[in-house]
Amino acid sequence: MVAEFERYLRCGTLANGFVRVRCTACGDDLLVAFSCKSRGICPSCMTRRMQGTATHLVDRVLPRVPMRQWVLSLPRWARFLLARDPTLITRTLQLALRCIFARQRLRARRQGVRGARAGAVTFVQRFGSALNLNVHFHCVVPDGVWTREGGNVRFVPLPALTEDDVVQVLHRLERRIRALLKPRLEALKEDARPPDMLAASQAESVSALRGRPPDSNLTEQLAAYRQGFSLHAGVHLHANNRQGLAHLCGYGARPPLTQERRASRRQARLSHEAPPRRRPRGPHPGAARVAAPSRHAGSTAARPPRAKPRRLRARL
């Protein structure tokens, strides 16, 4: 993490190196500073990676078929376990996709389609809009299945998704994730050793930042909630809405920090604005977090993974 912050502080500074670009037509010169290519701290480099990832997926990976976004969120105790162990992220994602694909195959069998196959592209996000540690999954799933007929592969669209479909997927998924994570949670409770600095920072980031309580008058379509688990599947895109698909992929690959939401305040303090629906109550209603720069650095260090995992994962 120290190396990540040091590269971020050198990013975009001409004194640390640059290239000179010259236009052969008009003779104009432009100096382009070297970038840090950070994976989780620098807003500029992460935004450039976000745009490149979204363009690659839309142009070369995702077919021109209807798409649906499935968003899985977990309770706070599960978020902490996944943040500490990347292998649990992989196993939890496998459980989620298996449950979603099983429901798709069941809906396809009701239409008389046998031997159906499904696929997905998943963005693993480790942060929330309030700069908190929040491991959750954004799955871009074709709203249909593929089947093989006479040596050819054909896409079969599925009928409209229902509330019962989302509820059944979440109920099955909640049971399986609990069976996976509960033994790890019990072992963590029995461990008498004091937590290290990273674990303490992650625990604080998971539990300290809380937004407004949910409004019972607001109902979301194609969404299910159960004991801290939530599953949303209300975002659906037409096959020809490639611009919307690029925006959806960019949202999944977005960086945790943006220059537009960060501002300086008095007494050498920084603030990070949250979207209107995520803004907490308090003396700074328009900001999700107001603290000294060192506190912002501590919360930032709690989010990026220790190694270099695959934030983007595809499964067929």
Image (spheres, rainbow, N blue to C red):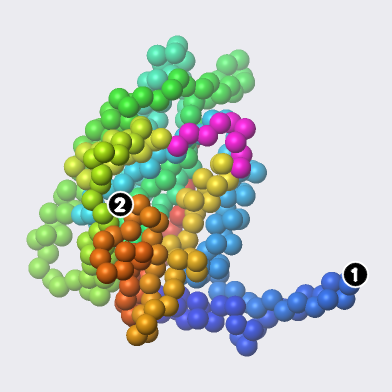
Q: Position of residue 258 (x, y in %)?
A: 48, 65
Q: Is residue 97 above or below residue 8?
A: above
Identity, as a three-letter code, of the amino acid under mark 1: Ala
Q: Is residue 236 magenta?
A: yes
**Mark 2 or mark 1: which comes first in sequence?**
1
Secondary structure under badge 1?
loop
Residue found 55% across the figure and 67% down from its top: 45
Badge 1 is on which residue? 25
Residue found 40% across the figure and 64% down from its top: 273
Identity, as a three-letter code, of the amino acid under mark 2: Leu
Q: Is residue 315 visible?
A: no
Q: Is residue 258 magenta?
A: no
Q: Nearer the viewer, residue 296 or 281?
A: 281
5 left or right of 84? right
94 left or right of 34? left
Q: Nearer the viewer, residue 43 or 304?
A: 43
Badge 2 is on which residue? 88
Secondary structure under badge 2?
helix
- Do the residues under discs 2 and 1 have CB atoms within 8 angstroms? no
Please count the marks in the image: 2
Q: Position of residue 304 (x, y in %)?
A: 39, 65
Residue 76 sits in quarter: bottom left
Q: Is residue 252 visible?
A: yes
Alpha-carbon distance for marks 2 and 1? 55 Å
Q: Nearer the viewer, residue 40 or 180?
A: 40
Image quarter in which the N terminus is found: bottom left
Specify the label residue 269 is tagged with. Answer: none
Q: Which residues are magenta?
A: 235-243
